């Protein structure tokens, strides 16, 4: 049966019945509507000031929604199908708009895509679930003594080559560990190339120096000639860095303690990873294959700072390159 919108007369009758304190089920019965229809109508149009339903306010809202629904109608169903496919691949509206324009497939604004997503949610759709979640809140640790990263003779980020600072070439990486549940040992290491944003993720059984070095050896071996420098934070799991330097000829430069902005590429990428590996969720069952799949997804997302090319395209100078185990 096709759904029929409430009429203006029905809205005024709902307002009158509400004044008589009739139940939702009784109102629905009198109007020949389902109780859920009456419930949605009242929830959608209750005034925030006093929480009361007013027919005039409800009718005004309805007409406004109809005007908004007509906007964007210049795009046909085939074009929206293309946009929705990219949304479900976890591309952001801005990334979708930029990449479609770059590929000369469709000229659409990210605001229009957002409106489409919210309209879809209002109608019970799930497109909004593919949008990135809010970022974690941070706090400054003023007044705390620095007790981390006390390694003798380690090179600091201030000594790092200018090519790394200015993102002039591929091969300068940022390194971090991302935890799962607070009580769990299992976690991941993330390596991100500063120029291209290309990501590699390694599964760790525990956040230890030994586990970290063993996983780094495997990740670096994938592209041994693409590693010039690595910039980690001051976690103790990176205290075995000299062994990695000697084995692979890559130089480590350490960020200052509690200065996460010095590794902004890594921090931002970790935020994207949280869409797939939420905070406080155990990583016990996470496999390296799953890590590769997550990295592959993010490496094939177009990025604004890359002119809406993907990290894969910039890193490899060709598209659709899959990670191997």
Image (spheres, grey):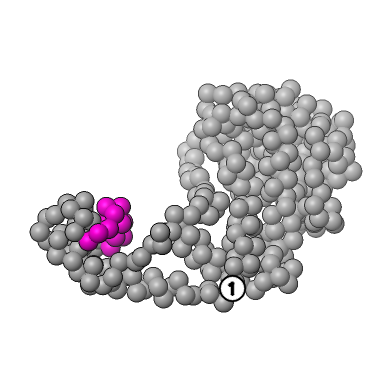
Which residue is disc 1 drawn over? 75
Left or right of residue 35: residue 188: right
Residue drawn where x is 65% and y is 23% of the image: 206
Tell me the crowding category of disc 1: few under 14, some 14 to 19, or many 20 or more residues within 10 angstroms, Cα based: few
Quadrant showing the C terminus:
top right
Answer above or below: position of 7 versus 187: below
Helix, strand or loop status at disc 1: loop
Residue closer to the observer: 168 or 154: 168
Residue 104 vertical position relative to residue 122 in the rendered view, above or below:
below
Residue 174 appears anywhere in the view: no
Q: Nearer the viewer, residue 55 or 215?
A: 55
Q: Is residue 143 left or right of residue 16?
A: right
Of 127 and 203, nearer the camera is 127
Image position, residue 128 (x, y; %): 51, 54
Bounds of the magenta segment? 31-45
Q: Residue at x 51, y 60 (%)?
A: 117
Work out whether residue 313 or residue 10 is closer to the camera in this orientation and state it: 10
Tell me, yes or no, whether the highlighted magenta stretch contains residue 32.
Answer: yes
Quadrant in which residue 270 is drawn = top right
Residue lying at 55% horizontally and 65% vertically, measured from the top left: 113
**Residue extending farthest left:** 20
Q: Is residue 235 magenta?
A: no
Q: Position of residue 308 (x, y in %)?
A: 71, 63
Residue 71 appears in view: yes
* Percent of width and height locating residue 315: 81, 52
Tag count: 1
Instruction: Give the residue at the far right of this rendering.
Output: 225
Q: Residue 193 vs residue 23: left or right?
A: right
Q: Give x and y (percent) for residue 41.
A: 29, 60
């Amino acid at each position: 049966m096709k759904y029929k919108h409430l009429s203006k007369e029905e809205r005024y009758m709902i307002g009158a019945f509400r004044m008589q304190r009739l139940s939702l089920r009784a109102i629905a019965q009198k109007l020949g509507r389902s109780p859920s229809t009456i419930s949605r109508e009242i929830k959608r149009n209750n005034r925030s000031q006093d929480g009361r339903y007013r027919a005039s306010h409800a009718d005004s809202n309805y007409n406004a929604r109809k005007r908004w629904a007509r906007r964007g109608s210049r795009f046909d169903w085939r074009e929206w199908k293309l946009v929705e496919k990219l949304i479900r691949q976890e591309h952001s509206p801005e990334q979708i708009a930029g990449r479609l324009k770059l590929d000369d497939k469709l000229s659409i604004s990210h605001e229009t895509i957002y409106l489409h997503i919210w309209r879809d949610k209002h109608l019970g759709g799930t497109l909004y679930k593919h949008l990135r979640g809010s970022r974690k809140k941070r706090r400054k640790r003023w007044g705390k003594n620095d007790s981390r990263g006390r390694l003798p003779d380690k090179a600091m980020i201030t000594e790092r080559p200018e090519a790394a600072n200015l993102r002039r070439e591929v091969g300068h990486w940022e390194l971090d560990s991302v935890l799962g549940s607070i009580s769990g040992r299992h976690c991941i290491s993330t390596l991100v190339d500063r120029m291209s944003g290309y990501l590699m993720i390694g599964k760790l059984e525990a956040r230890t120096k030994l586990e970290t070095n063993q996983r780094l050896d495997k990740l670096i071996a994938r592209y041994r000639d693409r590693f010039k420098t690595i910039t980690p934070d001051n976690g103790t799991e990176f205290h075995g860095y000299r062994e990695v330097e000697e084995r692979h000829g890559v130089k480590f430069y350490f960020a200052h303690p509690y200065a996460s902005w010095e590794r902004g590429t890594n921090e931002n990428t970790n935020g994207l990873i949280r869409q797939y590996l939420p905070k406080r969720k155990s990583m016990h069952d996470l496999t390296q294959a799953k890590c590769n799949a997550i990295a592959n997804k993010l490496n094939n997302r177009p990025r604004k700072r890359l002119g809406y090319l993907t990290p894969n395209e910039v890193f490899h100078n060709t598209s659709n390159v899959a990670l191997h185990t």
